């Protein structure tokens, strides 16, 4: 007895095409870990090492670094002329007056 040839539905063909396309782009999706930066509090000047922007009350001071203690410098490519860091949200306060009591969160 001879078997019938398999017929693939449109969904199977689409799934195979999508798998092929995603497989070809997989090397481009590999990324390096984000660098670490030292941020300085605008309130009390305390330093903080993190990979992401902690918010409008902080100013980026030094970096980038390869480690979470911000000790090992990270080799980077030079920034193009005129490149500027992102601006702070104008709706957030930048400092707390010395007479304002601090609350614990």
Image (spheres, rainbow, N blue to C red):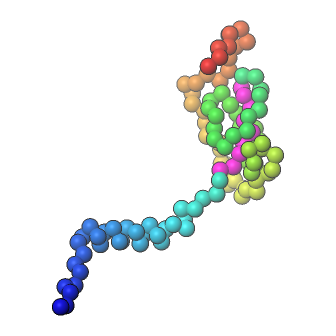
What secondary structure prevails in the magenta region? strand
Who's the residue at 24% across and 70% down the image? 10
The foreground one among 91 and 27 is 27
Who's the residue at 19% across and 90% down the image? 2
Q: Quadrant of residue 17?
A: bottom left
Q: Quadrant of the N terminus?
A: bottom left
Q: Specify whether 42 is left or right of 26.
A: right
Task: Give above or below for 88 relative to 35.
Answer: above
Q: Is residue 99 magenta?
A: no
Q: Specify whether 68 is left or right of 32.
A: right
Task: Give above or below for 25 relative to 41.
Answer: below
Residue 96: image location, x then y, percent: 68, 17
Q: Quadrant of the C terminus?
A: top right
Who's the residue at 75% across and 48% down the image? 67
Residue segment shown in magenta: 34-42
Who's the residue at 74% across and 44% down the image? 68
Kindly give the residue lying farthest to the right in the view shown: 71
Residue 70: image location, x then y, percent: 78, 44
Residue 88: image location, x then y, percent: 60, 33
Q: Is residue 36 magenta?
A: yes
Q: Quadrant of residue 86?
A: top right
The foreground one among 37 and 33 is 33
Residue 41: image location, x then y, percent: 72, 28
Task: Give above or below for 48 relative to 27.
Answer: above
Number of numbered discs: 0
Kindly give the residue lying farthest to the bottom in the view shown: 1
């Amino acid at each position: 007895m001879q078997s019938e040839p398999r017929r693939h539905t449109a969904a199977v063909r689409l799934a195979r095409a999508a798998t092929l396309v995603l497989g070809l782009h997989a090397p481009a999706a590999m990324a390096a870990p984000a660098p670490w930066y030292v941020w300085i509090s605008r309130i009390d000047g305390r330093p903080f090492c993190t990979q992401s922007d902690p918010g409008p009350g902080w100013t980026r001071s030094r970096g980038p670094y390869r480690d979470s203690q911000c000790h090992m410098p990270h080799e980077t490519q030079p920034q193009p002329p005129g490149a500027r860091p992102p601006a702070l949200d104008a709706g957030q306060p930048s400092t707390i007056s010395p007479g304002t009591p601090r609350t614990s969160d």
